[in-house]
Amino acid sequence: MSKKKGDSKFLDSVNQMYDRAVALLDLPPGLPEQIRSCNSIYEVRFPVKIGDGYKVFRGWRACHSEHKLPVKGGIRFALEVNQEEVEALAALMSYKCAVVDVPFGGSKGGLCIDPKEYTRDELQRITSRFARELANRDYVSPSLNVPAPDMGTGAREMAWIADTYRTLHPDDIDAAACVTGKPVPMGGIQGRVEATGRGVQYGLQEFFRHEEDVADAGLSGSLEGKRIVVQGFGNVGYHAAKFLEEEDGAKIVAIVERDGALQNDAGLSVERVSEYMRETGSVKGFPDATYVADGRPVLEVDCDVLVPAALESQITSENAGRIQARVVAEAANGPVTFEADQILRAAGKIIIPDLYLNAGGVTVSYFEWIKNLSHMRFGRMERRMQETRTQQALALLKSVTKAQIPEPLERSMQREMDELNLVRSGLEDTMREAYQHIRLVWRERDDVPDLRTAAYLSAIEKIAHYYTEYAVG
């Protein structure tokens, strides 16, 4: 997406949004700059033998704020990765963790690489070497710095990083907690793959529970029947679209991908689109939809909710004035530039900000980290006890009322307290509470114009409280 001259870069946008919010607080001199600044960034270059020769790779790991340890943040593999992007993502992680009350500082990593250009064995060697470089300087550690998946990485890469850390630290009993997003058999947690998309769903559900907020967007009712455009059909966009369609009854009227967009006003089948993309590697040619070769203008079609779930800076001053969506739900990190944010707000659009809506991944990563440190899966001790109590309660209810309990209610009561359901319950509670807090800031303060400013204020106040009350030196 091209930017107009004067549109801020990603890091500048994050800092400008921070500055806009911190100006509304009365903090001690120097503290706003301390919170805003990236504490450290490590750049590494390392060679790996590829074929008959060697190739030098370049990567980064940024620690934005270490007010709480460990710091947390994903590692992305992409050719577009650069130092400024990593710093911006690390800053967002600090604020994101504070907004949802996850006790981590913010970090982020990136390796300048196109994973599609390498074989599995080559990727394993590259990932392991990158992990070794980071771990040797404590940029991978269960107590100091805990990576996770991001764009271009997944459970497989996290398993390779964890294996490398164990090799370097065979006596660390908590080694499994050095990364999150691992395969479940290696200490991962049920629900982590879907977590960010699920968090988007829960965040939108909570927004639509508040009639006043929905009315401000010029909408009414629930998510059912709402027309949604999703940009980016990777892990986050796919899961968000799937859950919104299948569980909330929303209509996914467009899906925008790198190679074009699909449109169907009657609604697309998310699962069918996903299956087609797995088979063909493209959205082009999908039946029962109109294909648009240049997907960028599809962001501007008339809809209720636009969910940018791809890269940063997708909505800029160039196209913001043409966005017709009533709600922009930032499933990606930084999809709206600072200048575009101002245009959208002036047009009366409601923006549900990334540092809240995108927090599902780090929330479930926190659950995984706790699971690894406790060395016990969630629900192991109480699952059967809860099952017995539920059966007893149902039997008592039937004997007292002499009535038949509706089957859906009985199924709901008998739902197992297994790890996946516990994770989903914890994530939903986190997203609901966080939204209620930031909307309270928005509604109660006359100088807070929108949810983004409210979210930044919430994050900054929490981090500042730690520095003023607990920091030493």
Image (cartoon, helix red, strand yellow):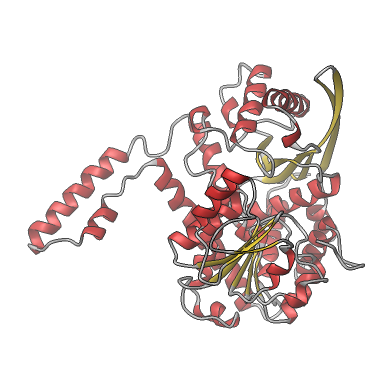
Residue visible at 74% across and 32% down in the picture = 139
User: Looking at the image, is 421 positioned above or below residue 253?
Assistant: above
User: Looking at the image, is 198 positioned above or below residue 138?
Assistant: below
Check the picture and name the quadrant holding the N terminus: bottom right
User: Looking at the image, is 103 positioned above or below residue 55?
Assistant: below
* Residue 320 screen position, x and y as percent: 76, 73
* Residue 239 screen position, x and y as percent: 54, 53
Residue 377 occupies which quadrant of the picture?
Answer: top left
* Residue 455 screen position, x and y as percent: 66, 65
Residue 102 seen in this snapshot = no
Left or right of 145 on screen, residue 188:
left
User: Looking at the image, is 14 positioned above or below residue 157?
Assistant: below
Q: Nearer the viewer, residue 44 or 67?
A: 44
* Residue 380 screen position, x and y as percent: 36, 35
Residue visible at 71% across and 54% down in the picture = 259
Q: Nearer the viewer, residue 156 or 216?
A: 156
Q: Nearer the viewer, residue 457 or 85?
A: 85
Residue 33 occupies which quadrant of the picture?
Answer: bottom right
Check the picture and name the quadrant holding the C terminus: top right
Residue 231 seen in this snapshot = yes
Q: Nearer the viewer, residue 53 or 188?
A: 53
Residue 286 occupies which quadrant of the picture?
Answer: bottom right
